[in-house]
Image (spheres, grey):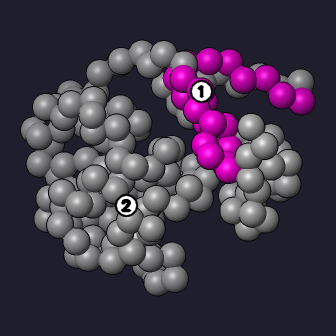
Amino acid sequence: MEREKNHFSGGRRYKNDEITVYWKPDACVHASYCYRELIEVFDPGRRPWIDMNGSTTERIIEVVNMCPTEALTWKWNDESKNIEVEKDQTNHVKFRRPELMAPEESRDEIRPVSVKIMPDGPMVIRGNFSFRYNGKEKNITNGIISLCRCGRTDHMPFCDGTHRKIGFEDKI
C-alpha cells in the first residue's frame, strides 16, 4: 500500500495493486458510511486511516461509491480500465474528480445541478452553478459543495461535520 500526501490539491492518495483511492478531507461531511461499512479499511482511529489491504478491491470500490461527496473517490491503476467505467460507479474520478484522470481519458461531461439533503446532515449541491454568499460569488463547474443545516459549523455556510458531534436531527 502506498500513501502520498498532497498528490492533488488538499488531499491524499492510497493505492493497492488495482486501484487508487483519493481522500479529500475538506470535502468530508462525516456521513460515516466508509468506516461503518468497512472499518477494516477506513479506521479514523488508525494512522494512516486508510488501509488498502484491509479488504478486497471490489468491496473498497463499493464502499467508496457510498460516499455522498467527493471526499472519497477512486480510479483503476490500469488507466485503460478507467475509460470503460459506467455511471453506476458514482465516485469514480471520471465523474467526481475528472481533473485526476489522464488527459486522454477525461471528458467534459456537464453534470446537471442536483440537491440532496443528507439525513441529519448537510445539504449537498453538485453540478454547474453559481454560489453567492456574503457578497462573494463563486462559479462551480462539475463541482460539489456541502452547506450546513445544523447552524453550528465553524465555516459557515459550509458543513464541517459539527452536526455529528452535536447530534443534530432533522426536523423535516
Residue found farthest to the front: 172
Within 10 Å of the Cα at label 1, are there few (<14), some (14-19), or many (20+) other Cα atoms? some
Name the residue tied to disc 1.
Answer: 115
Q: Residue 75: horizontal and vertical position, in percent?
A: 25, 47
- Is residue 137 rendered to the left or right of residue 105? right
Asked whether residue 28 is in view, the answer is yes
Residue at 76% x, 56% y is: 168
Q: For mark 2, what is the residue?
A: 13
74 displayed left or right of 168 = left
The amino acid beneath tag 2 is: Arg
Q: Under tag 1, what secondary structure?
A: strand
Q: Which image quadrant: the C terminus?
A: top right
Main secondary structure type of the part rendered in magenta: strand
Q: Tell me what residue is drawn at x 37 percent, y 61 percent.
A: 13
Query: Image point 68% across, 44% down: which residue?
Result: 122
Q: Is residue 172 magenta?
A: no
In magenta segment, residue 122 = yes
Q: Quadrant of residue 39?
A: bottom left
Q: Give residue 64's position: percent from left, percent from top.
A: 36, 53
Is residue 20 at least partly visible in the picture?
no
| Image vertical order of residue 94 relative to residue 7, above or below | above
> Relative to 107, is 153 on the left or the right?
right
Q: Which mark is residue 163?
A: none
Q: Which residue occupies the extreme bottom position in the image?
A: 46
For the record, the magenta segment spans: 114-134
- The residue positioned 45% from the left and 50% from the top of the image is 67
Counting every numbered tag in the picture gives 2
